Image (cartoon, rainbow, N blue to C red):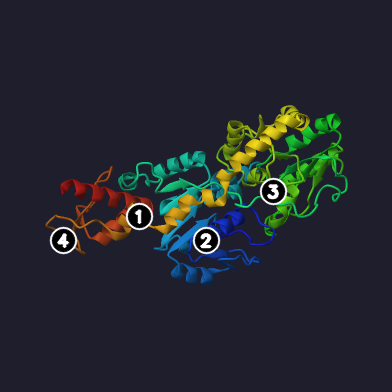
Amino acid sequence: MVTADVLRAQIAGPAMRALHICQRLAEEGHEVRLITTSPYCELSPQGFTAVAGGPDELAEAESWCEVMVLQGYVTHHHPVLARSTKIIVFDVYDPLHLETLALTKGHSGPARDEHVHISVETLNRQLERGDFLICASERQRDLFIGQLCALGRANPLTYDADPTLRRLIDVVPFGLPDQRPEHRRAVLRGVVPGIGQSDEVLVWAGGIYDWFDPLTLIRAMSGLSRRRPSVRLYFMGLRHPNPDVPPMQMAVDAQALAEELGLAGRNVFFNQGWVDYAERQNFLLEANIGVSTHFDSAETRFSFRTRALDYLWAGLPIVATRGDAFAELIERERLGLTVPPEDPDALEEALFELLADWEMAEGCRARVDEVRDRFRWSAVLQPLAAFCRQPRPAPDLAAAHAGPAPSTDPTPAGGEAVEVPASPGPDPVGAGKRSFSELVRFHYQQGGAVQVVRSAANKAVRLARRT
C-alpha cells in the first residue's frame, strides 16, 4: 500500500486508513508493505513493514507485489504506478475534486484552475485504471458510479461480470479499532488551565480545515456559555501532523473569533499542536459531547467525516450539522442531534438540550454503543479483504490488455489486417483494415485508454454474438 501521508505518532485520516488496511490484510495472512512517499516514517507497526520511499523503493515494491493499494495523489506524483500491469486497488474515500474546490474557495486565477484540473485528472485516471475501487459510503459510491459511467468503465464486460458493479467499486467506510478505548491518563480536566474536573466538555476531534465551520460553533458557544457557564469547548488539533501542510485559514479565523467574543481560554480552547493518535481516547473519554459542524456544499454531501467516528468509539452523544452521510446516521440511529448549516441559535439549543437532559444523553450513549460495532475495522474492511483473497483484474482492463479475442474471420489478426470496431463517428480515412498496433494507436489518440477499452469490449461482444 502506498500513501502520501506522513507516518508519525501524530497522523491524519489517510495515514490512519492506510495503517488499518495494512494491519487487517496482514492479519488475513498476506505479506504487506506500507510505503509513504513523504519523507516522514517514524512508525514500526507489528505484522507488516512501513518505510518512506522514493522512485527506487516504489519500483522495487511494484516489482515485488501482486496487488497495489493506492490513495490520494500518489499516482499524480508517481504516474509509473498507474501504468503497472499488477492488480491495482484505488482507495477513493476522499473525493479529491470536491475537496479541492472547497479548499481553494475564495481564490481565483490560473493557480486554482490548475489545482482543480489536477484533482479531476488524477481521480479520472484512477477510475480508468482501477481493477477494484473502495469508497466510504453508498452516497459516495453513487457519485463514483456516475463518474465511472462517463469514463466508459460501466461497460458490457464489467456489467455482465456483476450487474451491481460491486466487483468494480464497493463501500469500505472509515473504521474503528476492534478494542474499546481505555482512559489511561488525565489530559483535559484539571490539566488544561481553565478546564475543571466538573466542567461540561465538548470536543472537536481532528483538525480545523477550510471546509469545516467552527465559526458557527464558536458563536453558539457565546450564548451557551451564558446559559451554562461551566461549558468548555476543546479543539484537539490546529497544526497538521505533516509539517509541509500550511496552516488553514479557517483555523486562524476560528482563533480570532474566539478572542473577539472573549471566549478564548475561558470557554473555548485550542490545542496548538496535534494529539497523538495513540492518545486520542484520553481526550474523547473526558468529554460529554462530540461536535462536528460544516457548510452546505457538494464537498459536505459526499464527504465522510473520519474523525467523527471516534465519537462512536468513545460512546459520545453527537451534535452535527446536517448534510453528510454521518448526519444521516446520527438521525437514523438517534445518536444525538443534527442542526441546519450556519445556524448558531439551533446549534446552541441542541447542545443545551443534550447537556441539560441527562436521560436523553444516556439514551444516545446506549444507542452509540449498539452502532459502533458495525464500524470496526475488521467489519468494514471485508470487501477489500475478500478481494485480496482472490485478486483479479477488472474484466474490461483484462480484455484491453489481452487485445481483441481470437476472431473467426478468415483474415488473420497477428500483425495482419483486422476489422476496425464500429465507432459512432465517420470512419477515418484508410481505416477499413488495420494492423492491431495501428488500431490500438488510433483509438488511443481518439480517446485515450478508455477508448481502447471500450473498443475492445465492443469487439468482444460482437465476436460473442457471432459464435
Question: From mark 1 to mark 3, how far is it between C-alphas?
Answer: 39 Å
Question: From mark 4 to mark 2, how far is it between C-alphas?
Answer: 50 Å
Question: From mark 3 to mark 2, how far is it between C-alphas?
Answer: 28 Å
The residue indicated by pointer 1 is 397
Question: From mark 1 to mark 2, how far is it between C-alphas?
Answer: 30 Å
Amino acid type, residue under disc 2 in the picture: Glu
In the foreground, 380 or 147:
380
Determine whether the residue tagged by mark 2 lies in a helix, strand or loop. helix
Considering only order in the chain, which callout, 4 or 3, is on the residue closer to the N terminus? 3
The residue indicated by pointer 4 is 412
Q: How crowded is mark 4: few (under 14 residues within 10 Å), some or many (20 or more)?
A: few
Q: Which of marks 3 and 4 is in front?
A: 3
Residue at image coords 20%, 48%: 464
Determine whether the residue tagged by mark 3 lies in a helix, strand or loop. loop
Question: From mark 4 to mark 1, how far is it between C-alphas?
Answer: 24 Å
Label drawn at residue 206: 3
Question: From mark 3 to mark 4, how far is it between C-alphas?
Answer: 62 Å
In the foreground, 234 or 256:
234
Considering only order in the chain, which callout, 2 or 4, is on the residue closer to the N terminus? 2
The residue indicated by pointer 2 is 27
- Which quadrant of the figure has residue 34? bottom right
Q: Which of marks 4 and 2 is in front?
A: 2
Residue 419 visible at all: yes
Label drawn at residue 231: none
Considering only order in the chain, which callout, 1 or 4, is on the residue closer to the N terminus? 1
Residue at image coords 27%, 45%: 423
Amino acid type, residue under disc 3 in the picture: Gly
Q: Which of marks 4 and 1 is in front?
A: 1
Residue at image coords 54%, 60%: 22
Q: How crowded is mark 2: few (under 14 residues within 10 Å), some or many (20 or more)?
A: some
